[in-house]
Image (spheres, rainbow, N blue to C red):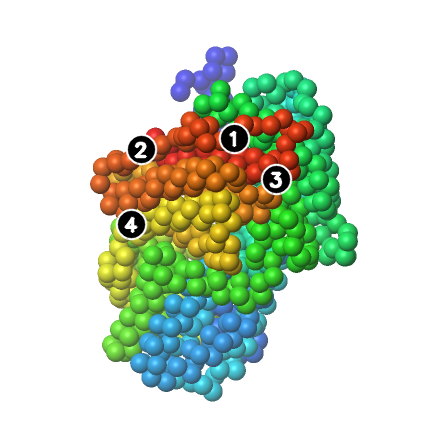
Amino acid sequence: MRPQQGASPRRARGRAADGPAAAWPGGLRRLPERAGEFVRGHRAVVGNAVRVTAASCVAFYICRYGLDRAVMSVYATFTVVSLGALARIPGSGRQRAATVLTALPAGLVLITLGTLLAVRTWAAVLGMLVVGFLVAYAGTTGPRIAGAAPGMQLLYILPCFPPYAPDTLGQRLLGFLLGAVLLAAAQRILLPEPDTPPFRRLLAGAAEAAADLAGHHGGPVPEPVLARARTAADALRPARIPPADLPAAPSLAHKAMAHAAEAVRTLLNRLDALHTAAGSQHAYRPETTALLRAVGDAAREAAAALRHGARLPPGEGPRAGPLQSELAPVRTHRALDTLGRLSADDRLTYLRRRSLVVQAADSAVVLVLATRLLLGDRDVDQDPAGHAFAYARAHAAELWWRRLTTHLTPRSVIFQNACRFALGLAAARAVAGLLDLQHGFWVLLATLTLTRTTSLETRSAVRQALLGTLIGAVVAGGLLAVAHNHGAVYAVLLPLVMLLAFTAGPLRGLAWAQGGFTLVVAVLFAQVAPVTWQLAPVRLEDVLAGSLIGLVCGLAAWPRGAAPEVRRNMAALCQAVADGIGRTAALVADRAGAADGGAGILALNRAMMLAQESLAQYQSEPRERTARQPDWPAVLVAGADARRGERLLPGRPGRITPHEVGAWLRQAAESTAADYRALARHLRTGDGPPEVLPRPLDLGALLAVAPPVPPAGAAPPARADSAALLVDSVIWLDALTADLARIHREM
């Protein structure tokens, strides 16, 4: 570069020569700023690495150098690593700490079992098979348990190897307790993950947004009100909710929260459609305005109760009665009016628009009842709309048993994953025991951390792990050869190596994680017992053995992952939808089959759960090529629509009359069900497009058998209730037909 004009060459050369020297102090001064930017940009990873490093090192130093208990130090350190780094416990710092402390009894049992079953290889292998399956399968009961499962596996793996030393069980248990308590404290104190809004607060906010939206009775709705309602509905989507806050456990409270969330999302959707539909700018009729006011009042009462959060005293809390009293005449009046115009409404446009306010009111009733159930009122099933709450009086043991048995089938991806991990860990334990490997624990750890749900993903993980372990072993071997038995060197290096490994692994990938952990193991074990550089190649050999076992299990046990199951389970869901349509039509038209005790809804719920789990895993699995898939979320929407009708329609007053109209409804339901069965057969076989296209409802046949519609004021109560039930059923079948058409368009 030429000197600037006006500057002497000597002065310019002086500045050029002093440039790097002058820049060096400036770079040092900016180092804290850059470190701060890095921490802020990767707060979750850095925060977890700091917490795990601090808790691990404190636990290790206390036990190893303060108490001189080598066994206790190993168990304290690996407890922190297993539950803090290997596990993926979701949630805020408070929630993570609570999960760790809740796992204390199970951890004590696992360590005790591992210690006692290490007496024989066959006993340890059998225990590994059973424990491996049970711990992995326990993830069906919620995201927190599922996130903790890999770390809990390690609590059995660590003590189930020789030497058989039941006399050290006390040290092992004390080390585990110390490590768990220190980790819980670190989760709460050191860079804790921020608290998220409780799910009840999200529900309350959505209910308040619905109340504001229902407060507009014609004319343009202000855009901020619509935007708030849409944001509130979107915030309740399962994909938007942090896993730790998702009401996914089989407890009564979580089921009531999930039910309330479905109801308030439907309420917001129907109110949004009502206010944005064509013709919505005009003033509503007086009965519609009164009903919308009742909807707003009910939603606001539910929101207030949710925010308060206390158990409801008898006779207090949000009430569905006032809303139901406003809803009944509007339902019948609109039904009679709609049937009178049906001959000119061949596309059901008028019927759909006229039913939006009734569907919104139905959802508000369910929201109120679900809120009451959440706050302790188990009598909601006695309400006229309580057919949807058949689970309200179920005991906690029954609810947990239903959830645990839901996935107890080879068609469940959770069951498949539990079997895959259990077989892999048992095989690794057998190999380590039969070959008398020096550090067999590392074989099982490699199998646990490298086994994936597809063979493709497992092969990729094994390649990265072996590369990282090789590099880490070389570095660790050099360190052990240079430092030899100087324990002070390892004591100083331990926190630095841990912080680097637990930060670089999540940020840079599996190779960095395995290489860093290899270095951590070398530095840790060098302080427990005398070691040489030969520890590094032993670690590499054990990781290689564990990788091969995991690869074999990945190839032998469901190697394609969730790809086959997502089609099978979606086909099963379509079949369950068809069965639900038939059951609901029978209940509505003939009032027959009401004694199933809710078994139909349970079957539909089970099919939906299996389909949702398989789809979630399928979407997370990498693939070499992506073939065009049907619109799987649309199939789940169809399942939700079928379940909503089966929950609500049988509880409606009245009966479909005359007999010919009931026969039309049964025929229309059977036609829609047949289309879903045809879709289920196509999904099972996968041969070409579906042979049968969805058929619209035959309104001409309904008009041919329907009697003349009397004016709303002159209709007898039984006739009005029959008309309302018929219109609700037609709208429900129309929604299922629209879902089916959407699925076919994507195929």
State the SS at label 2. Answer: loop
Asked if disc 3 and disc 2 are in contact, CB closer than 8 Å, the reply is no
Q: Is residue 156 above or below residue 743?
A: below
Q: Is residue 555 above or below residue 436?
A: above
In this rendering, the label closer to the viewer, 4 or 3: 3
Name which of mark 3 and mark 1 comes first in the sequence. 1
Name which of mark 2 and mark 4 comes first in the sequence. 4
Asked if disc 1 and disc 4 are in contact, CB closer than 8 Å, the reply is no
Per the rendering, the mark at residue 707 is: 1
Per the rendering, the mark at residue 718 is: 3
Q: Is residue 104 above or below residue 362?
A: below
Q: Which residue is mark 4?
A: 564
Per the rendering, the mark at residue 693 is: 2
- Amino acid type assigned to the residue bearing label 4 in the image: Pro
Q: CA distance from mark 3 to mark 1?
A: 14 Å
Bin the neighbour count of mark 4 within 10 Å (Cα to Cα): few under 14, some 14-19, many 20 and up.
some
Name which of mark 2 and mark 1 comes first in the sequence. 2
- Residue for point 56% across, 22% down: 277
Residue 314 locus on image (x, y percent): 77, 57
Bin the neighbour count of mark 2 within 10 Å (Cα to Cα): few under 14, some 14-19, many 20 and up.
some
Residue 56 locus on image (x, y percent): 52, 65
